[in-house]
Structures are given as structure tokens and as C-alpha cells.
Image: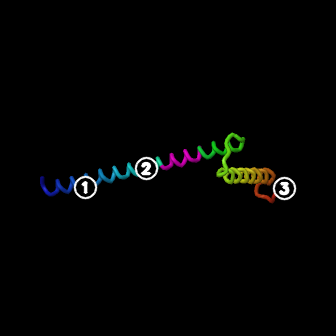
Amino acid sequence: MGFMDKVKAGVKSGAEQAATKAQEELERLQTKRDLGQAYADLGEKAFELADRGDLSHAELAGSVDKVRALKAQLAAIGTAEATTPAGGPPAS
């Protein structure tokens, strides 16, 4: 094997390793994203259960109250937006 063949083989090997690393990183990030979504889904379901009284635990109470408060705040903001003319001050 000549010098140039060795260089080409080395470059090819490096490119393959880089591609493998990139694929592994992509898979890691996708799995991390899926895990985050699974946690979000679980949290939403836990809130629904706690909100209707099917699930209770002292450690959940603060988070459930916070979600309720944020939902109320969001509803109030939505109500304010509905009564505000586009580009103008809130309606009186």
C-alpha cells in the first residue's frame, strides 16, 4: 500500500468515525427529548388525577397548586386579550 493509499484510508476511517459519533449524538439527543416529553406527559396526567381528587400526596400539593394558579393566570390573560381591541388599550 502506497503513502497516498494510507492517507486515503486514514481519512476514510476518520470520516466513518465522525459519522458514527454524529449518529450516536443524534440518537442521544432524540432519546433525551423523548424522555423530557415522557416526563411532561406523566406530569400532566398526574396533575389531572390530583386535580380531580384521584391522586393525593403531600409532596404533590405545592406543584398542583402552582399549576392551578398558572392556569387561572393564563385564563385571565386570555380574557384580557379577548376584550382588548387589536393595537389599542384594554376596553373599559
- Label 3: which residue? 91
Instruction: Tell me: residue 87, above or below residue 52.
Output: below
Q: Earlier in the sequence, mark 2 or mark 3?
A: 2
Question: Do the residues under discs 2 and 1 have CB atoms within 8 angstroms?
Answer: no
Pair 2/1: label in front: 2
- Label 1: which residue? 11
Question: Residue at the location (12% across, 52% down)?
Answer: 1
Question: Residue at the location (71% across, 52% down)?
Answer: 65
Residue at disc 1, secondary structure: helix
- Callout 2: 10 Å neighbours few (<14), some, many (20+)? few
Pair 2/3: label in front: 2
The color scheme shown is rainbow
Question: Do the residues under discs 3 and 1 have CB atoms within 8 angstroms?
Answer: no
Question: Residue at the location (77% across, 52% down)?
Answer: 76
Between 70 and 18, the residue placed more toward the observer is 70
Q: Is residue 13 left or right of residue 87?
A: left
Amino acid found under the numbered disc labelled 2: Arg
- Residue 11 position within the rendered picture, expressed as x and y whole percent measured from the top left: 25, 55
Residue at disc 2, secondary structure: helix
Amino acid found under the numbered disc labelled 3: Ala
- Label 2: which residue? 28
Instruction: State the extent of the magenta-drawn residues as a range.
Output: 32-41
Between 34 and 57, the residue placed more toward the observer is 57
